[in-house]
Structures are given as C-alpha cells and as structure tokens.
Image: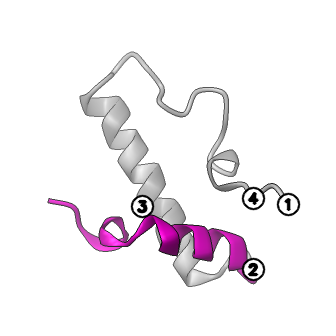
C-alpha cells in the first residue's frame, strides 16, 4: 500500500516541481520528502549496498532544468 503523496499522479509532481513559488511551498515540500523517503526505503530494503540516487543529492533529485 502506498500512502500520502505517493498516491498522486506523476503529472502532479511535475506541476508542483515546475510551478513552485518558493522552497517552502508545502506541496513541493511534501512531494520532496515523500520521494526521499521512498528512495531511502528502496535502498534499505531492496539494495542495502546500493544507492538508487547515486550521483546526485536531495536537491538534484527535484531539479528543474529550464
């Protein structure tokens, strides 16, 4: 079962990521934290020796190139 922001569409994440007004935009913060938690859980349970986000950091995972 997936809870909270994880049940939202990818389109919502793209909208929130692209249209955020500030780093404190609550929708962006919720999405960003959910994604970080999901990736952390993947690393912990699926590939404990790996890093699914290798080569980037938390900000890089949500960066918008314009």
CB under 8 Å between callouts 1 and 3?
no
x, y (%) of residue 27? 53, 80
Residue matched to label 3: 34
Query: Could you tell me which residue is drawn at 46 percent across and 64 percent down?
Result: 10
Q: Is residue 34 magenta?
A: no
**Is disc 4 placed on a helix, strand or loop?**
loop
Q: Tell me which corner region of the image, top left, top right, bottom left or bottom right, holds residue 43.
A: top left
Which numbered circle lies on residue 14?
none
CB under 8 Å between callouts 4 and 3?
no
Earlier-in-chain disc, 4 versus 3? 3
Q: Is residue 13 magenta?
A: yes
Residue matched to label 4: 64
Crowding near the residue tagged with mark 2, few <14, some 14–19, many ≥20 C-alpha atoms within 10 Å: few
The residue segment tinted magenta is: 1-21
**Is disc 3 placed on a helix, strand or loop?**
helix
Residue 24, above or below 32 = below
């Amino acid at each position: 079962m997936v809870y909270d922001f994880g049940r939202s569409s990818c389109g919502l994440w793209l909208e929130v990521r692209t249209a955020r007004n500030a780093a404190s935009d609550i929708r962006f913060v919720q999405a960003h934290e959910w994604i970080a938690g999901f990736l952390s859980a993947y690393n912990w349970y699926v590939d404990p020796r790996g890093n699914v986000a290798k080569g980037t950091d938390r900000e890089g995972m949500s960066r918008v190139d314009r």
